[in-house]
Structure formats: C-alpha cells, structure tokens
Image (cartoon, rainbow, N blue to C red):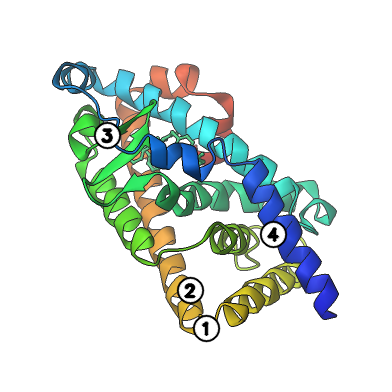
Amino acid sequence: HSLRNIDELCASIVRSHRETSQFPLGELQALRWKLFSREEIQAYQSKSVDDMWQHCAIRLTDAVQYVVEFAKHIPGFRMLSQNDQIALLKTGSMEVVLVRMCRFFNTENNTVFFDGKFAGVEVFKSLASGDLITAVFDFAHDMCALKLTEQQIALFSALVLINADRPCLEDRGRVQRVQRSVELGLRHILQRDNLEGLLHKLYQRMAVLRSLCSLHMEKLRWFSQRYPLTAHSLFPPLYKELFA
Ligand SMILES: CCS(=O)(=O)c1ccc(CC(=O)Nc2nc(-c3ccccc3)c(C(=O)c3ccccc3CC(C)C)s2)cc1
C-alpha cells in the first residue's frame, strides 16, 4: 500500500460518507433546538406499541438504505460475493446507523433527530423498549464525547461494516484484505491528526455496538411474537431482510 493508495482510499470513503448521509452536518446542527411540543410528544406517547414500532422501523429502514449505498462505494466491497456483501450488511448496517447517531444527537438536552425534530427518550415510550432506547441514547452520548470528525466517522463506519469476524462469510480471506486496507486508512488519518489514542477507544466501542444490536434483535423478536401481523406484513421488506 503506497501512501497514495491509502490517501485515495480515505478520500473515496469520506466522499461516499458525505454523499450518503441524508442530512449534511450543518443542517442537523441548525435544527438542534427544534424540539417536539407537548402535544406532539403526547401524540407519540398515545400511539399503540405496534404503530410506534412500525413508525420507527420505517425511519430506521430509511437510514439503513443510505448505509447500503455507503457500503457499495467502499473500495473493495463490491468485489466481495453478493452473499458476503449481504452478510456484512445484515450485521453491520444497524451498527453504522448507531455510529452515525453522533451526527444527530444533541448532548446538551439529550435529544435525537427523529421525524424532523429533536426527540427525548419520552417520545419513544410507546415502543415499550425502554432498555433499548436508554442504551441507544447512552451510546450516542458516549460517541459524541469522542468528538469525531466527519472523516473519522466515515472511516470508522467503513471499519464497522467490513468485519471479517462476521458469521456466515464465504470468503473470509477476501473480507480480511478489504478490512486491513480500511484499518490502514483509519490509522493513517488518526496518526495524521495525532490521535492514535482514539483508535483503542473506537475498538472498544465496537464491542458495545454488538451488544446494542443484539438487544435490538431481542426486542424485535419479542415484538414479532406479540405483533406477528405487523412484523410480517407491515414492516419494510429491507428491515425484514436485514433484521428478521
Ligand atoms: C444517519 C444519516 S443523518 O443524515 O445523520 C440522519 C438522517 C435521518 C435522521 C432521522 C432518523 O432516521 N432518526 C432516527 N432515530 C431513531 C431513533 C429511535 C429511537 C432512539 C434513538 C434513535 C431511529 C430508529 O428507528 C432507531 C435508530 C437506532 C436504534 C434504534 C432505533 C429504534 C428502532 C430500532 C425501534 S431513526 C437522522 C439522521
């Protein structure tokens, strides 16, 4: 890997991240004090469990669709087999949405950008998944504390996705080669920014991401048992494909 290749790799991953974030950072910052009114919060809280889950599943699927686009532009991802691409997205796409949350989380009032405004945990009460939501908010808070730049979010997101330890990969060796190039890219920009210490913290966060996603899957299983009709016929196909 000559330096030129690494620079080109980083540039293409950062460009892809920028092109596949539904909102530019500036736009989200400008909206950070746009909060839901008491009436709007009441309306969310009076939704039925299955209505709110369906509502969130649609929002999450939107966010995941952009992550799929992001993955397709990571150099080397498209050279992997279709099955390996799907396997990496099945386990990694939700994790990348969670990493990206540090872009749309306001640590000053503990709110997340959702449905066009910033929402506190109370908005999600009718999901009946308080432990998942609390864990998601805590993680977002923790990620914000790292004060990642867009470049660091881009490279870390690519590393979260291209993970050769994921289950059911056909050609682990090939995924490993792409993963190593992304690791080199992340190391390169952290060394350039004199932030080697951050690398260790990011690897620690990857373990938290895995536990958050298994909590999401556990909640989804609980929900699908209680509301099989909603889960099977009203959730977006991509959500079912990736998470069910
Ligand atoms: C990501 C690109 S962006 O341009 O920055 C962007 C683009 C668009 C948005 C708007 C947006 O989709 N916000 C969502 N917020 C939440 C959410 C909801 C509960 C708490 C915390 C965040 C969504 C979810 O459904 C979600 C996300 C992660 C974990 C869990 C869930 C709940 C589900 C699984 C029941 S979608 C935000 C930011």
Residue type, mark 1 in image: Glu
> Under tag 3, what secondary structure?
strand
Which tag is nearer the camera, tag 2 or tag 4? 2
Q: Give the answer, above or below, for where 200 lies relative to 209.
A: below
- Cα separation, mark 1 vs mark 4, equals 30 Å
Report the quarter where the N terminus lies.
bottom right
Q: Residues within 10 Å of mark 3 (few under 14, many from 20)?
A: many
Q: Is mark 2 within 8 Å of ligand 1?
A: no
Q: At which x and y percent is residue 184?
A: 69, 77
In the rendered image, residue 64, in percent from the top left (x then y), is placed at 55, 38
Residue to which mark 4 is pinned: 169
- Whether tag 2 and tag 4 are in contact, CB under 8 A, the answer is no
Which residue is identified by label 1? Answer: 196
Q: Looking at the image, is mark 2 or mark 1 earlier in the sequence?
A: 1
Side (left or right) of 69 relative to 240: right
Q: Residues within 10 Å of mark 4 (few under 14, many from 20)?
A: some
Helix, strand or loop at label 4? It is: loop
Mark toward the viewer: 1 or 4: 1
Q: Mark 3 or mark 2: which is in front?
A: 3
